[in-house]
Image (spheres, grey):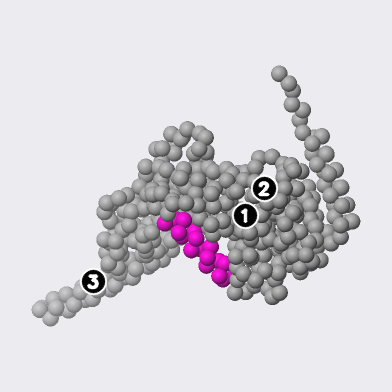
């Protein structure tokens, strides 16, 4: 009898082990296998939330199939107590293991709302936008000019959120003065900037910052990033350029940046000015004349006068020979690369072609033909403008 009992107990124990092994294998598969999400979701880990709360919220949003398995797996992998506050974009099919890795990695939030403070040549604006998890694209919520408009209520309310992301975007071609003045208006930054950095020293780019970040530290980061770009591209520059220092190359890069906003034209525009320098021709470029007038402090807002084109200043390239004494803006990486590796052409002239780009020419005769075509386009555009009625 006892033998039969022992045999039955052993059989039952083996069955329990088999069931336990099966449950363990099923749980492991559920934890590491593809998750149930069909569309991406933006999931927020509240500050101070427990693993149990997060597990249930994930199950409610359909990000995990079973809150208990997620919790057990997180604790088993020693990540249950490592949850980081923030908003996370969870991709379709993410496994529970991938989700817990994401929620414990920390760093900047990967979804939710973001403030993008944009400093461009003509304007400075603030854009509050929100990531649409289904399209993985940001949708604009509100936009305003911090210098000219009242701060919208949507921005005031949203900017207090703990998981808000903050970004400073500096466009190519802005001057150092414009960057400094723009950063002064960024109400989420702290600290003062002592003086205006040298022209050309700041890297136009997008910078993620924390609320309360120091303005001077951000300027230092921009300066360091630009120095790295210049050093990297200078090392692979073309041979026989008509300038032999990085400083002179940056002057050329800033001119290229201001002359064209068409990416594929930069190398061609650079070739025109390089060819002119090699032949001893004056550069004759309007942006340098404008910089001599404004000193980089804002935009001119009107056309150049003949008297200004004739006046001798260090930046009037219709009068002086060679390059002006310094950059006229902060060029981006592409413009610097164009200045250091220009296209090989015989072009000496260019003029707007009516499409946003330019028509290039190797001879004055061909250039004059291009200018005549542009004048026709200008006249047609002016004729097509609606008439303004008087009061």
Residue picked out by circle 2: 290
Residue marked by disc 3: 16
| Count of labels in the image | 3
201, 31: nearer the viewer: 201
Residues tagged 3 and 1 counted as in contact (Cβ below 8 A): no
Residue at mark 3 to residue at mark 1: CA–CA distance: 79 Å
Label 2 sits on a secondary structure element that is helix
Residues in magenta, as a range: 217-233
Label 3 environment density (alpha carbons within 10 Å; few <14, some 14–19, many ≥20): few
Q: What mark, if any, has residue 345 been given in the picture?
A: none
Magenta residue check for 117? no
Magenta stretch, overall SS: helix
Q: Quadrant of residue 338?
A: bottom right
Q: In the rendered view of the protein, which quadrant contains the N terminus?
A: bottom left
Q: Position of residue 288 (x, y in %)?
A: 67, 52
Q: Is residue 22 above or below residue 50?
A: below
Q: Are marks 3 and 2 in contact (CB under 8 Å)?
A: no
Q: Is residue 149 left or right of residue 163?
A: right
Q: Secondary structure at mark 1?
A: loop
Pick whichever of labels 3 and 2 is earlier in the sequence.
Answer: 3
Q: Residue at x 67, y 53 (%)?
A: 315
Residue farthest to the front, as pictured: 312
């Amino acid at each position: 009898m006892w033998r039969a009992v022992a045999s039955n107990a052993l059989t039952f124990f083996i069955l329990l082990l088999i069931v336990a092994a099966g449950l363990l294998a099923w749980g492991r598969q559920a934890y590491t296998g593809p998750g149930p999400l069909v569309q991406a979701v933006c999931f927020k880990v509240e500050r101070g939330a427990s693993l149990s709360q997060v597990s249930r919220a994930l199950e409610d949003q359909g990000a995990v199939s079973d809150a208990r398995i997620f919790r057990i797996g997180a604790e088993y992998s020693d990540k249950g107590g490592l949850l980081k506050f923030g908003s996370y974009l969870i991709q379709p099919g993410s496994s529970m293991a991938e989700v817990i890795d994401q929620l414990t990695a920390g760093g900047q939030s990967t979804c939710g709302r973001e403030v993008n403070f944009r400093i461009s040549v003509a304007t400075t604006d603030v854009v509050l936008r929100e990531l649409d998890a289904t399209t993985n694209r940001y949708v604009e919520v509100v936009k305003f000019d911090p210098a000219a408009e009242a701060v919208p209520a949507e921005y005031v309310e949203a900017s207090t959120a703990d998981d808000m992301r903050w970004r400073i975007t500096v466009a190519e071609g802005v001057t150092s003065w414009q960057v400094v003045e723009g950063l002064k208006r960024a109400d989420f930054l702290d600290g003062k900037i002592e003086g205006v950095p040298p022209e050309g020293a700041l890297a136009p780019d997008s910078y993620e910052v924390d609320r309360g970040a120091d303005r001077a530290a951000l300027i230092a980061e921009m300066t360091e990033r630009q120095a790295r770009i210049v050093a990297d591209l200078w090392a692979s520059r073309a041979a026989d350029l008509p300038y032999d220092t990085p400083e002179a190359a940056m002057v050329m890069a800033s001119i290229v940046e201001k002359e064209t906003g068409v990416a594929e034209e930069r190398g061609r525009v650079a070739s025109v000015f390089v060819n002119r320098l090699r032949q001893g021709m004056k550069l004759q470029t309007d942006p340098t004349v404008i910089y001599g007038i404004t000193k980089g402090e804002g935009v001119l807002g009107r056309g150049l006068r003949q008297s200004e084109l004739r006046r001798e200043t260090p930046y009037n390239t219709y009068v002086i020979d060679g390059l002006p004494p310094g950059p006229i803006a902060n060029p981006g990486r592409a413009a610097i690369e164009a200045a250091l590796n220009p296209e090989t052409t015989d072009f000496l002239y260019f003029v707007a072609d009516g499409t946003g780009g330019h028509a290039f020419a190797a001879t004055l005769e061909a250039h004059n033909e291009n200018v005549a075509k542009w004048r026709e386009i200008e006249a047609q555009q002016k004729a097509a403008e609606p008439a303004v009625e008087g009061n």
